[in-house]
Amino acid sequence: MKFFTTAQIRQLDRYTIEHEPISSINLMERAADALYWKYLQAFPYQKPVYIFAGPGNNGGDALALARMLLNTGLNVKVALLSAGNLSSDCETNRQRLVDKYPDSLMEMKNEFVAPEIPKETMIIDGLFGSGLTRPLTGIFAEAVHWINESGCEVLAIDIPSGLQGEDNPDLSVPVVKARYTFSLQFPKLSFFFAENAEFVGKWEVLEIGIHPKAISETGSYYAVLERPDIRQIIKTRPAFSHKGTFGHLLLLAGSKDMAGAAVLSAGGALRSGTGLVSVHSSECNRVIVQTAIPEAIFHSDKNQNMITEFPNLEKYSALAIGPGINTGAETAEMLSQLFAQLKSPCILDADALNIIAQNKDLLEKIPTGSILTPHPKEFERLFGPNHNSFERMQKAGEMAVKHQFTIIVKGAHTLIAQPDGRLIFNSTGNAGMATAGSGDVLTGILGSLLAQGYLPNEAAKLGVYLHGLAGNIALRNQSEESMIAGDIVENIGLAFKSLKDE
């Protein structure tokens, strides 16, 4: 699903108003209605509600929501903060609220007055929406500080007040710390960045009926992977198939004391559907790999403890390299020689990336279409430091276009930066996957998909989504604390099955 910048969202709103057609106040009413029904579904208990509304359209949404909740019989109080005039629709909803529930509203124009509310109150933040472009000051900053110190649960409408929709270079400014955020129609780009998580909390997108033509005809570089996107990628496996039909992956993984990396990568590859997996590793890993993964073919390096060579590449459909191979001089020389011979895309992870970071000239030798899978620290070693996740995302996009390879920056909402400039975020996965070997499993999955004939952009999207989905399924029988990488491998089959089920 593609999503948009805050400037584009304003354009989509205008298009909807002009072409549905619908008045802006009725579009606001529709947004408030979506918020109302979601609130009742998410918070069925009858706790008191205190709503902070601002002077713009986000405040108008909040005032309309207050009226709807009062109609239901909830105990709702509203503080309307403004340092000047209200927007037209906000003023309309202020008057509608006052006409029906005059005692529910307190207005604050020049001075913030801290309300006296019980700790079990739900605070709803409707001060400012995603169009904010400057730090909050005055009574608005005071209100945000009070909200954050209140000890109450906080729900933000569309985006926590003070947080901007894209880049937030200074998070020392006042920003509401919400436990929940109900975003209208689209997620905001800033939701996908780690440093913003303490403000956004758990977020969910609410459909408010933006014109479908406007959505389809407005271009965007941003997207988030969802189930329908992935289902259309998965290939049908012909009935008259054999192991050769689904490719032969060569996996270069493991050195002394790192056999587990090879085992986990090979397991991820085999569970993801490739017909054959050959593991090239140091001789010291032979017994471990062949015992743990008997389905894999083992090729021994001439070196007892590290990988210093590679087999003839002609019979393999795809190559994945990096997990646990170490960064010694002989292994680095092997990688350089490999790039000199390799003409097709490959998967590069872990120590392969660290070798490239130490020998930057190798960046230019990576085959076009390859997939790199750094975690944030590996990304910095490759491409230099970043001040925040927004800057890292921009740099990933630039490097993917410049070098014409795909960069998968691993983490919550894993980023896939494509050679065409598109920036795609993942929607599957959980904190239990932050465990040793999880990335090795992903390398195996990606290599398997490439070996089966998936295009690199298809393999990247399917592989990342599948990896996270397997982790989510594993969590049904594990906790985030107890999950290990092997649990991800063991649930890849169920992940595929769930994607294929109607």
Image (cartoon, helix red, strand yellow):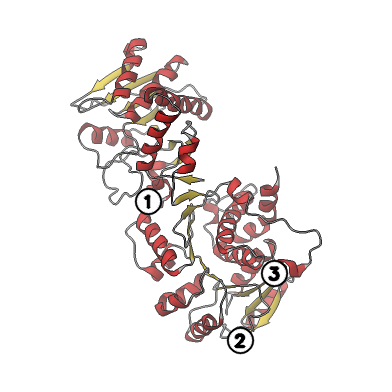
**Front in this rendered view, residue 283 or 33:** 33
Circle 3 sits on which residue?
A: 247
Circle 2 sits on which residue?
A: 304
Around disc 1, counting alpha carbons within 10 Å, would you say few (fewer than 14), some (14 to 19), or many (20 or more)?
A: some
Q: Is residue 204 left or right of residue 492?
A: left
Quarter assignment of residue 294? bottom right
Q: Label 3's element?
A: loop
Q: Counting residues from the N terminus, which is met first, the one under dot 3 or under dot 2? A: 3
Q: Label 1's element?
A: helix
Amino acid carrying mark 1 in the image: Glu
**Front in this rendered view, residue 217 or 243:** 217
Q: Tell me if I can see residue 197 in this picture.
A: no
Circle 1 sits on which residue?
A: 195
Q: Is residue 93 above or below residue 347?
A: above
Q: Residue at x 41, y 22 (%)?
A: 26
Which label sits in the foreground, 3 or 2? 3
Around disc 2, counting alpha carbons within 10 Å, would you say few (fewer than 14), some (14 to 19), or many (20 or more)?
A: some
Q: Is residue 115 left or right of residue 347?
A: left
Residue 234: x percent and y percent? 66, 54
